[in-house]
Amino acid sequence: MSDEARSAELREQAKAIREDLQRLIREIEKVIVGHGDVIEGVLISLLCGGHVLLEGVPGLGKTLLVKSLGRVLNLQFSRIQFTPDLMPADIIGTNVVMEDELGHRHFEFQRGPIFAQIILADEINRATPKTQAALLEAMQEQSVTVAGIAHRLEPPFIVLATQNPIEMEGTYPLPEAQLDRFFLKLNVTYPSIQQLEEIVDRTTQRDAADLQNILDGERIDVMKEFVRIIPVATHVKNYAARLVLATHPDSPYATDLAKRYVLYGSSPRGAQSLVLGGKMKALLDGRYNVSFEDIRAIATPSLRHRIILNFEGAAAGVEPASIVAEILEKTPEVVRG
Amino acid sequence: MNSEEILHQTARVLARRARWVRRRALLLQALFVGVCLCLAVAIFYRFVPLPIGRLVEINLACMALCALVAVLIGLRSRAEPMALLIRADRALRLKERLSTAYELATSPNSHPFRAIVLQEAARVARSVNPFRVIPATTPRTLRWTPFLLLAAILVLVVDFGVMLPASLVGGGHESSHPALYEQGQKLERLGKRLETEARQRGLERSLETARRMQNMGLRLQNEKLNEREALARVNSLTEYVRNLEEELKKMAVLEDVNIAKVREVMVNQANMTGEVQRLLGMLARGKLSPSDMRNLQERLQSLGQQGAIDERLNDALNQLREGDLEGAKEALEQYLLQDQLAQDFEHLKRAERALERGLEHNPDGGGEMDLDHPSGDSREYNEYEMAGEPPGGGGGMPGDFEGGDFLDSESTGANSSVGSGRGTETESNRSRIADTNAPASKITGQSGEGGVRRSYVRALPLKADAAIPLEEVITTYQRRAEESLLREEIPPKNRDIVKAYFLAIGLVEESTGGDGKEEQRER
């Protein structure tokens, strides 16, 4: 195949992906008013194979967004309401004694709600750390192990967790290992007055919109592969790496805020998130290469939940997002030599 | 032209532009450095005046050197295409299309997106304007250039004498007359040379004089005079400088004569006279054996080889060869007599001259004499070290030595002492002084602080050799005699007698040229 033909084919693929994503967004927007960046972030995570932590006060439509996504994607959807008494087996499943027609008893694995393709982990911080940890293997390895037997989760597998940042009573902060496994952390903010009016109109005057399936699992897999081959120039990768290193207080790239308030910086997953998210951004922008701008655009949702504040930072109420903002401001795109 | 070629072409265009901008910036910076150097040279010029031509040459050389360095650095500078394309991406907000494409194009590994990325890059590369990507900016430091130039001009032009103390202002020579400036430089050089000499010899007064000369030279270089004044000053200074040069030359020549040489000459001269007397004694015995005759002839010949060639000695030798012993004896006696008469005659002439001067100064014969200085001029006396050769320099005093006769003397300065040695054989010596062709011996000596005195001594001790070498004591005794006069140790009644005595023996010479004296004082 010639370069021209190959280029034409790639252009067609990219165009088709963009159109699919646009259709997906339009379909979700039938239900969700505003939150364009949150929707885009969720789609980016979906096509990058990552999980999303949605943070916002109650009533902003987090759960609705995830449920809508589950409906427009022809994927198995599962919702897990995290409560303090939720046990890992309630998520993963367990072996139960079964009796067949002949009266023979045997253990049979009863799948938990984790065995789905889109998981809504609602109010994930209400479960105990033990239960939260049940998700670790599933999120990273996309498999669960019960009684020494590994059970594969069907791809695409995406966990969309929500948490309430203001209710501290009866909640358990997510452990760092768990946080690090989320590709992006998206903040769901309060809608504007126009958006609020629209929400009121949609929810009080007519029935809920009927959403259609736009994408299936196979299509999503193709799109995921396409995104991964988008080229990234060396100096852009270098910029992403320096951004991640700048979150570490002991790094020579660290900024003043990072040195003062950060206990631990981002893991390498942060760099992966930056580059992959940058690729998705470029694709959505109609480009075939990643720019510094793409990296910068995805930096805050990629890094903010990976920065662990020290006591001083927590006491001072420093937002990790402000540290990332300072890093973006002070880290040069290109370093000479 | 395919996409890759377009991309490379863009990179080349940007590289050309980057090189040009870099060289321009380097040249501008070199200009700035050159201006800084010019300012430094201008400041230096205020303290160490240079001819204006030399100043311009130095400034031009500085500028040329800076420009040369800038050109060399500019020629060596290379622009990386990748860096330029990154810069173009950032400047034109091309979202890293060019740089990513260039990386893919130059990468040995194939990439599925290579073609499509190159096409995208080629599309945007057509709109790349190198002047926007690499604008020709002026280095920030150059904004100081006008101020530096202004400062350099101010330093060169403005007379800081009205604002600063004179000691801080060197002053250029533009305002002074060129000839005056040149003479000033010459005087300064001579002063430095004299200072070196004075340091080596530990002469404090000469050192002070040398410094005065240098200061005068510096002042002269900066002195503002009109044409006539300048020429008058130049004429007087030229004369002064010439005298100094001659003096320094003399000093250099006299230095060649060391003490050992003087001693050798003196001993030879004494031996010669004694030898002639011994030869006379041999001839007086009457008959001589052939070996004595040969011995006599050889000794006469050796006398001639020692420098005492005289007609009578030659006659004596010839007559001796012919066997005429009486004739030879007579010739030798004539030789001794004539030598003695010559010394006596010389001494008488000096005494007569001294008496005449004494009468001129003291026509009444009883006036008070100026005892501050033998010559009556204390200023001249103080400066006798450095002055050229005044007709009537400071007086010298005779030493108490065995025989010998001072006919003339010189010093490094103006000291011209004339004296006559007085010793145990004074009367006989006096009677023997007459016109003579005997060579004058030079003696160098010093007593305490002051100039080195070099005296010419004609004739030699007639009897035994001096117990103490003449050159070691003569100046000491002279100085002591001077000091006795100055300290007024001599009773007032006897001063005239003492003065007359020194005048009679030719030690103190009065100034014979008023003009020369005045000139000396002025200097």
Image (tube, coloured by chain):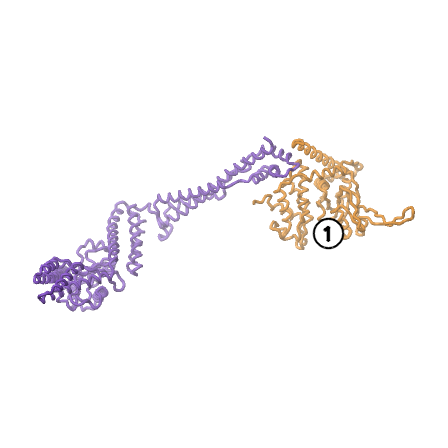
Chain colours: A orange, B purple
In the figure, is residue B49 to the left or right of B343? Answer: right
Judge left or right: residue B37 versus residue B499. Answer: right
x and y percent of residue B165 in the render? 36, 52
The chain identifier of the residue carrying mark 1 reads A
Judged from the image, the secondary structure of the residue bearing numbered disc 1 is loop
Depth check: give the residue in front, A269 or A37: A269
Q: Identify whether B180 is placed above or below B133.
A: below
Picture residue at 41% right of the left edge, 46% below the top = B39
| Quarter occupied by the C terminus of chain A | top right
Tell me where residue B313 appears, x and y as whole percent: 12, 59
Residue extending furthest toward the front = B290
Residue reaching furthest to the right: A102
Whether residue A146 sits left or right of residue B307 in the image: it is right
Instruction: Give B501 or B378, whichever is nearer the viewer.
Output: B501
Few, some or many residues within 10 Å of mark 1 (<14, 14–19, 20+): few
Residue B60 appears in the picture as rendered: yes
The percent position of residue B462, horizontal first and vertical second, equals 15, 65
Residue corresponding to mark 1:
A175
The percent position of residue A91, horizontal first and vertical second, equals 80, 48
Dot 1 amino acid type: Pro
Do we see residue A192 in this rendering? Answer: no
Relative to A246, is B248 on the left or the right? left
Q: Quadrant of residue B154?
A: top left
How many marks can you see? 1
Q: Quadrant of the N terminus of chain A?
A: top right
